[in-house]
Amino acid sequence: MDYFQSIPWCAALLEKPGIVLYTPTCRLAPDANSALSTQDQFFRINLRHSDLIPYAIGVYEDPFFPTIISPSPTSSGLRLLIYSSTLMLDIRPGTNGYNGSAHGGLISTLIDEAMGSLIYINHKFYTEVEATQKEKMPSNVLNMHGVAMFTASMNVRFLKPLPTPQVVLVTASLNKIEGRKVYLDVEVKNGEGMKFASCEGMWMSISRERL
């Protein structure tokens, strides 16, 4: 947090009214989200290096904040409680592939993590709201109880090289929900709004009892 606060454009984003900060699931300690000790080792351990991705934080807009406009429901009538979330990531030269820019496979990994973080924070917030403020829960929000979700497909477009080092924003947003399928749109940008990659992703839901 202190690292990003030291960068003016990052600090301005983090201090916007209605913005909520959270630790991405890939940087939580194994017991903090009841995960197995083998989960998230790539991001939580291997990439947490001074020359790779030493700093990461997640942000989203509080859906109950007075000035936040709730998104319209998707064509199915369903929506997520938190429509969009962003990972703020410090990308260092150790992630480079060709010619001083981040490896394309790494960019795809960031996109997948952003989608997973949106699903994670929705599940966490849904559980908290239902337990403490159930009267505020909109009737058209996707029920997250007893459900696990996983990446089913990703259509990634690499728009331009992503030079390192720099801080990037990877934003995942809901597109639509159709049955067990949750469609997400993702963009990878820098603080000036330059877009490096985009993705159309699809996640599938499954009952946790079937895992």
Image: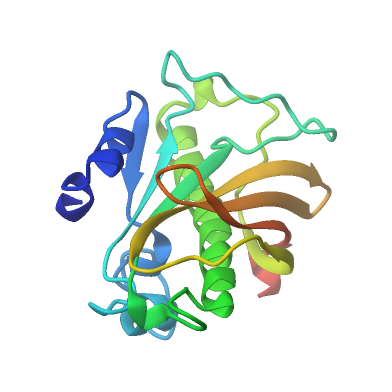
Q: Nearer the viewer, residue 26 or 131?
A: 26
Position of residue 195 relative to residue 165, above or below, is: above
- In the current view of this chain or complex, which residue is farthest to the front? 99
Q: Quadrant of residue 96?
A: bottom left
Q: What residue is drawn where x is 43% and y is 67%? A: 163
Q: What residue is drawn where x is 33% and y is 67%? A: 165
Q: Nearer the viewer, residue 61 or 136?
A: 61
The reply, left or right, for residue 1 in relation to residue 125 is: left
Position of residue 185 relative to residue 27, above or below, is: above
Horizontal and vertical percent for residue 174?
66, 43
Q: What residue is drawn where x is 70% and y is 29%? A: 140
Q: Quadrant of residue 100?
A: bottom left
Horizontal and vertical percent for residue 15?
26, 31
Colour theme:
rainbow
Horizontal and vertical percent for residue 19?
36, 32
The reply, left or right, for residue 115 in relation to residue 178 is: left
Q: What residue is drawn where x is 32% and y is 82%? A: 45
Query: Visible in this render: residue 89?
Result: no
Q: How many marks?
A: 0
Q: Nearer the viewer, residue 33 or 189?
A: 189
Which quadrant, please, contains the C terminus? bottom right
- In the current view of this chain or complex, which residue is farthest to the top? 66
The reply, left or right, for residue 67 in relation to residue 183 is: left
Position of residue 93 relative to residue 205, above or below, is: below
Horizontal and vertical percent for residue 31?
31, 71
Query: Visible in this render: residue 14?
Result: yes
